[in-house]
Image (cartoon, helix red, strand yellow):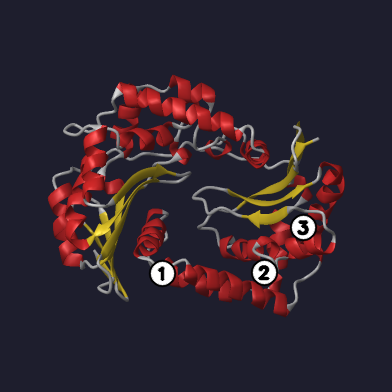
Amino acid sequence: MKQNQKHIQKTTLNNGITLIVIENPTTEIIAGRIFCRNAGSLWEATHQAGIFHLLASVMSKGTRHLSSLEIAEKVESIGAALGTDTSSDYFLVGMKTITEDFSEILALAGEIIRYPSFPDTEIELEKKITLQNILSQKEQPFNLAFSQLREMIYGQHPYGFSVLGTENTLNQLTAFDLKECHQKHFTPDNFVISLAGKINLDQAIEMVENIFGDWQKSHNRNKLNPYPLYPQALDRKIEQENQQSIIMMGYLSPEITHPDYPILKLLTTYLGNGLSSRLFVELREKRGLAYDVSAFYPTRLDKSQFVVYMGTASQNIEIGKEGLYNEIQRLRQEKLSAKELEIAKSKLLGQYALGKQTNAEFAQIFGWYETLGLGIEYDEIFPQQINNVTLEDIQRVANTYLKDSSLCTSIVGK
């Protein structure tokens, strides 16, 4: 299978690896993103929350042939960048180097992906570091408020847990668990390799075949456990003495493949993106209620969350909460003006274009779309979807998802 889209090409290798090449001959840098589908916290069992984060932390700390130090020396000796990471919906290996050294860094990435050794000492070290991060987040009001909100919205769904996991689940993870997880999820047919820079499709195929070509695809298909979600209105507060209090309001909302996804993205831009956003103007500029105020709607494979939040003085918690709620109510009751809608569209599409300037950004966005099942074509589809949003769409979506019956409110403060 081969597909062309401007200077972007896609092919699928015999073992199931999807390869995307964004050719950019104007630079001597190649950036790569290697995505693993069916990986990330969405695929974790409740009792193993955080396993993919630990896997990402440990995979680059030793392979069948290389120690942690040797891996670090190889990367540094050619001035390259190589790192592993995980998210809610996928696992990621990122790399960047000059063109002439790229085959070497891709081979090293292949070694890390296929043959991690999971040294016990490195596992214990990374567990300690992660535990410190978990404890640190509990001291940060924003993270604490978001953690509480996430639990209210998702319950025992994997998205209800931090990507880091919990103290309890992390302490129970073993080298055997990591090896089993790696063997189950890391198969070539789960991988998307996205490369951007001074490289063409034929060169990329040869390079990837040399490193990954003998990797046999698995015939075992990983399946998600169904986690039914039942939205309900909840209101919780954590008493904590801080310089500012955090108010968060959130609603269960659609996944990226839902037709209402682009409308909610546009709504987030209008409400909370920048100094001209409604929340900033109404609650900070006009009323002086907020130190910080915004909205976000993460892109997710499964149900997402639409969140508005405010940082305010402790004495303003009740009036701030009322202010946030009233702005949501206005969206449901009053249509935006045509000018407001056009400004929001221009802002969102302008920022979308600005997010695709470097090779790393190109490799990320096209690999990400492919990993989420949208295909590289979605880069052209998304702006069209935004341009097609109407005033009626905005009000319909606000009334469909931002309902009192599913409003969760999380507060941290005195």
Q: Give the mark nearest the N terminus, 2 or 1.
A: 1
Residue 74: percent from left, percent from top? 21, 44
**What amino acid is at disc 3?**
Ile
* Residue 6 image-quadrant placement: bottom left
CB of mark 2 within 8 Å of CB of mark 3? no
Q: Does dot 2 land on a helix, a strand or a loop?
A: helix
Position of residue 396 in the picture relative to residue 91 (left or right)? right
Residue nearer the viewer, 75 or 159: 75
Residue nearer the viewer, 262 or 76: 76
Residue 196: percent from left, percent from top? 30, 64
Q: Which mark is residue 328?
A: 3
Q: Give the mark nearest the N terminus, 2 or 3.
A: 3
Quarter of the C terminus within the rendering:
top right
Position of residue 270 in the picture relative to residue 221 (left or right)? right
**What amino acid is at disc 2?**
Asp
Q: Give the mark nearest the N terminus, 3 or 1.
A: 3
**What amino acid is at disc 1?**
Gln
Q: Which residue is mark 1?
A: 357
Q: Which residue is mark 2?
A: 393
